[in-house]
Image: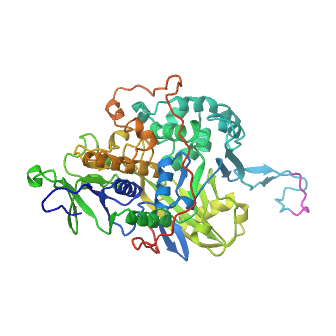
Amino acid sequence: MSPPADGPVASAPLVAVVGGGLAGISAALACADAGAQVTLFEKRTRLGGLTWSFTHDGLTMDNGQHVFLRCCTAYTEFLDRVGSAGDVELQPRLDVTVLRPAASPAPSRDASPDDGRASDGAGPGHRRPLRDDRPARAVLRRGPLPAPLHLGRSLLQYSLMPLGDRLRLGRAVLALARLDLDDPALDAQTFASWLAGHGQGEAAVSSLWDLICLPTVNLPAAEASLSMAAKVFQTGLLTDAGAGDIGWSRAPLGLLHGERSASALRKAGVQVRLGETVQTVSLVPAHDAGTHHRPRFEVQTGKGRVGADGVVVALPHYCTEEVLPPGALADHVRPSSLASSPIVNVHVHFDRRVTDLPFFAGLGTEAQWVFDRTASSGAGTGQYLAVSISAADGYVGRRPEDLAAQVVASLRALLPAARPAQVLSTFVTREHHATFRATPGTAVHRAATRTRLPGLVLAGAWTATGWPPTMEGAVRSGVSAARAVLVAAGQRHALPPLPREALRGEPGAATRARLAGQKGPREKGPRRGRRARPEGAPELRTGGEAADSPVYQLPKLEEVG
């Protein structure tokens, strides 16, 4: 990918992609599919970014648990492109079991000292409390009605929320569905403050709203921007009945994303340079470039310089500015100002099966979301559960053995079958910078795809995708960046199509200019076809050959910090 010495430029533009996460992989594939000559740089020795796998005690584990929804069409198209669509499970209908540990003793029947129960010395017939240690259980399941009525019956029967709060849900749901996602005022307040203004108290927030907000925004409602929470609920639950159906990987993420992507990139002709850190991206001065036949940019790594007609920088928010040339970003946009929100995963291997559920959510417990990863781990005996803790500021600094013991206790409180089970092993993984922290006021620092320098574009879940920091947002940003860099390089044909919701224009670009002066969130006017119902995900066809690329190797970890 070095610049030619002289002569006419090749018909295919030269594109450099910096970063081998989902955003960078998506951008590289989209550019290569459009005919560009692509080089991808990744400082790690693997692809996949924050989705990766490792081996420990003979088990294949993922660093974190990642799910997607049926509305995540860009991500499912990505899986199809790399040959991994046959390795994911997608619910035919939203169905989530929610468990809560027993909270208080229940009154016992009259008991006498000789009925087999321990005596408390109070005498025969004394009515004493007997703890009911069975967990409370509820199911959120969509029905046959159109959105937003498809969850109505399930929510009315949702016994983990007080009845009065359930009866007040309708007001908040309808108001949430009417919010204008393009209104910058939504990024000026927390989701919890908005909920409080619509009749939702602390019990409702903790038992329902945070159940969804925590894993999708990686923040509780008390900290999350209303803008991001509204996006989650509108797109995932309130617009199309099937949009919120949950999908997950049956294979290790290192295979699903890393190995399969390495194979797809190689077959597309992309040069993948692992273990090579990009230090800077610089603009070649016009007098040095000579003519437009010379590359406009130089990518500096520890191994030399590479020329490119266009560059996609797909790095995390906290290190993007270090690579960009001066003046690339608008003065008010500072990605490094975005804080990070951590995620902690606790891996527990029991000596027997303790649940038949593929996954479930927990309330009032450290076990926020629990996934059965036995099959993908290769465990020959017992059952391996992975417990995901989002917004894990209070857990990320804990000693692994203390946190593991607390999570095991939480699992036993939720799963009676786990109480007599022996724990074969535990392991803790931490992602300190799992996502950017989507608090109010962060939209201004989520940079647009195009920078001030034509041909230099940005990608990543932290950019102005209009989505919270998710795999869907990362893929969407990569595809949008590929199109922008190709257009800037002069290509006008065979361009990758924009993600479906981006067809109206780049989300966030117009709203950041209106951030000041808004007094409150706008609601949309009468629904007269303004908002198209999102289409379902493409059919997840079975297929995808096993990767034979030497580019990716599964690491073995003895300790993850």
Report which quarter residue 113 is drawn in.
bottom right
Residue 112 within the magenta-colored segment of the rendering: yes
Identify the magenta region: 109-116
Kindly give the residue lying farthest to the left in the view shown.
Answer: 287
| Picture layout, residue 331 above or below residue 122 | above
Q: Tell whether 114 sits left or right of 396.
A: right
Dominant secondary structure of the residues highlighted in magenta in the image: loop
| Picture layout, residue 311 above or below residue 519 | below
How many badges with numbers are in the image? 0
Return the residue nearer the eye: 108 or 532: 532
Residue 48 within the magenta-colored segment of the rendering: no
Return the residue nearer the eye: 49 or 442: 49
Q: Would you say residue 381 is visible in this rendering?
A: yes
Report which quarter residue 29 is drawn in.
bottom left
| Residue 529 image position (x, y, % from top left) | 52, 27
| Residue 362 image position (x, y, % from top left) | 63, 53
Return the residue nearer the eye: 54 or 393: 54
Q: Quarter of the image for the C terminus: give it.
A: bottom left
Q: Residue at x 59, y 66 (%)?
A: 405
Q: Quarter of the image for the N terminus: give it.
A: bottom left
Q: Residue at x 41, y 40 (%)?
A: 502
| Residue 109 image position (x, y, % from top left) | 87, 51
| Picture layout, residue 221 above or below residue 429 | above
